[in-house]
Image (cartoon, rainbow, N blue to C red):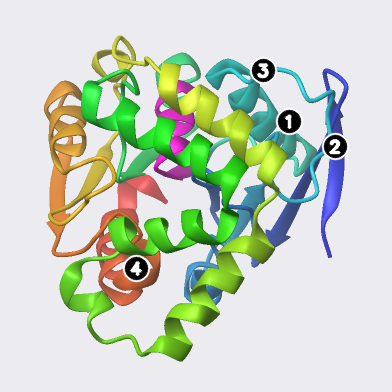
Amino acid sequence: MNDTVEIAGAQVAYRVDGSGPALVLVSGTGGNLHSNWDHLIEPLAAHRKVIRADYSGSGQTRDDGGPLTVEMLAEQILAAVRACNVSSFDLLGYSLGAAVAAHIAAEYPQLVRSLVLVAPFARGGEPRIKLQFELWQQLIRLDPAAFARLVLLNGFSPAFLRGFDDAQIDEWVQLIQQSNRWDGMLRQIELDARLDISGQPEKINRPSLVIGCAQDYILGPEPARAMAAAIRGARYAELDAGHMVPFERPQELLHLVGEFLAVPARQ
């Protein structure tokens, strides 16, 4: 069952699973605390207190519908953490959630024990990335099912997608449509397109792991590599997967995250 916490007029939904050292999860564009993480929660929460929240535009969180900022989303995540009486935590962000997580680690280092960024990007205004987000906005308004098919085409690696039959593709298309709040996702994509946290990575001084995707056809692998290079002492790992790596390579992702978080200094 989800709880809610209020901050700046927003009712932010969050959920806690497990017990132990806190691990905070931050979802990607269009994702929510269930759709991005449910299939990973059991192993993550086996020895940890896992906190996940819906920031504005996702899931059950409700607000005034205005424009979004990274700072706003970060404060919503931190409000959920405070509601759980947690004073320090490991932090894992995916895609847009990685930008939010990087901001938190840069601005609130006293709260963050360690940082994991999965398929991150620092700037949404780069021509190829901006073109992707503009196309997303147009397709969502015109044909959400076509948008869902494009996400599958660009989000998974070709080898992984070749293993799908027509029924599985249709099932994924339905899942993407059912799990998204289109009005909220459009607000998040608008933030994606103007995102610029390029000054934040160099400020991060927490133990960090950046995970890139060799076959990321949404962002390309270069933004993750650049993020790792900009964070002092960051470890970089790259999986042979598309941008939707939590779904394409969940076990490999869990292994990398678990190995990194298992270092005693991060407990």
Check the image and report above or below for 174 versus 187.
Answer: below
Q: Which span is picked out in magenta?
A: 90-104
Q: Would you name the residue on which mark 2 appears?
A: 5
State the residue in front, 227 or 194.
Answer: 194
Q: Amino acid at mark 2?
A: Val
Question: CA–CA distance between discs 1 and 2?
Answer: 7 Å
Residue at the image position 32 percent from the left and 71 percent from the top: 248
- Quarter containing the N terminus: bottom right
Q: Amino acid at mark 4?
A: Leu
SS category of the residue bearing label 1: helix
Density class for disc 1 (Cα within 10 Å; few <14, some 14-19, many ≥20) is some
Q: Are marks 1 and 2 in contact (CB under 8 Å)?
A: yes
The extreme top residue here reads 199
Question: CA–CA distance between discs 4 and 3?
Answer: 33 Å
Residue at the image position 34 percent from the left and 68 percent from the top: 254
Question: CA–CA distance between discs 1 and 4?
Answer: 26 Å
Q: Is residue 28 magenta?
A: no
Q: Name the spot of residue 245 as percent of width and height, x first.
A: 32, 62
Check the image and report above or below for 254 versus 25.
Answer: below
Q: Amino acid at mark 1?
A: Ala
Residue 67 numbered tag: 3
Reading the chain from its start, which is encountered first: label 3 or label 2? 2
Reading the chain from its start, which is encountered first: label 4 or label 3? 3
Question: CA–CA distance between discs 1 and 3?
Answer: 19 Å
Reading the chain from its start, which is encountered first: label 4 or label 2? 2
Pair 4/3: label in front:
3
Question: CA–CA distance between discs 3 and 2?
Answer: 20 Å
Q: Would you name the residue on which mark 1 appears?
A: 79
Residue 38 in view here: no
Q: Are marks 4 and 2 in contact (CB under 8 Å)?
A: no
Q: Would you name the residue on which mark 4 appears?
A: 254
Q: Quadrant of residue 255?
A: bottom left
